[in-house]
Image: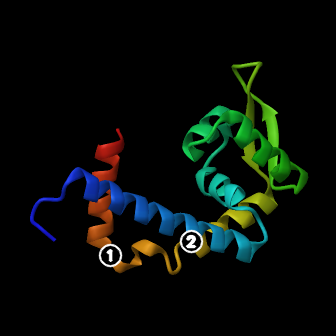
Amino acid sequence: MSASVGGVELCGLVARLNQRMDSHIRGVADALGITASQAIALREMSEPITLTELADRMSCEASNAGYVIDRMEKQGLVRRQPHPTDRRAKILTLTEDGQKCRSNVLDALSRKAPIDALSPDEQRALAELLRKATS
């Protein structure tokens, strides 16, 4: 590889990493008996959150996130509560079962991940570069 990476090559590399990460998430979800969208939602629900915020973190439309949350609510993983300041919004919180499922998802995602080929320092550097590129 040359010293300078072109935009086309960089786009291809990011796309391939994204494909590998998606495949990893699907494998984790299948092993845990949930959908990939549910695994992504659980990964992103580190604290109580609105549906709009969750959709943004999941990089999808609110209606798609709503469908995922509807299913998770029926499974007893998520609870909707009134928003303290916005009557139109609901706060999504994980139930005890949801918290256990999230913990299982996070544990499984951290094993055999595509970025395991990178050292911890390289992972931190990649995260910083991606934050900079996506801000």
- In the displayed orientation, state which residue is furthest to the right: 74
Q: Which numbered mark, 2 or 1, is in the foreground of this view?
A: 2
Question: Going by the image, does 75 lie left or right of 61?
Answer: right
Question: In the rendering, at what x and y percent does residue 13 appear?
Answer: 34, 62
| Number of marks | 2
Q: Does residue 74 show up?
A: yes
**Residue for point 74% across, 62% down:** 35
Which residue appears farthest toward the left when viewing the image? 3
Q: Does residue 1 sit above or below 132 in this rendering?
A: below
Identified at 30% across, 45% down, the residue is: 133
Q: Nearer the viewer, residue 27 or 48?
A: 27
Instruction: Residue at 26%, 59% (x, y): give it.
Output: 9
List x then y, in percent, for residue 19: 49, 64
Quick one: quadrant of the N terminus?
bottom left
Q: Quadrant of residue 63?
A: top right
Task: Say the numbered circle drawn on residue 94.
Answer: none
**Picture layout, residue 74 above or below residue 134:** below
**Amino acid on which disc 2 is placed:** His
Would you call the spot at circle 2 few (<14 residues within 10 Å), some (14-19), or many (20 or more)? many
Q: Secondary structure at mark 1?
A: loop
Q: Colour mode?
A: rainbow
Residue 24: which disc? Answer: 2
Question: Which of the numbered marks, if any, corresponds to residue 118?
Answer: 1
Question: Quick check: 55 left or right of 96?
Answer: left
Q: Crowding at label 1, few (<14), some or many (≥20) Cα neighbours within 10 Å?
A: few
Taking 103 as reference, is 24 left or right? Answer: left
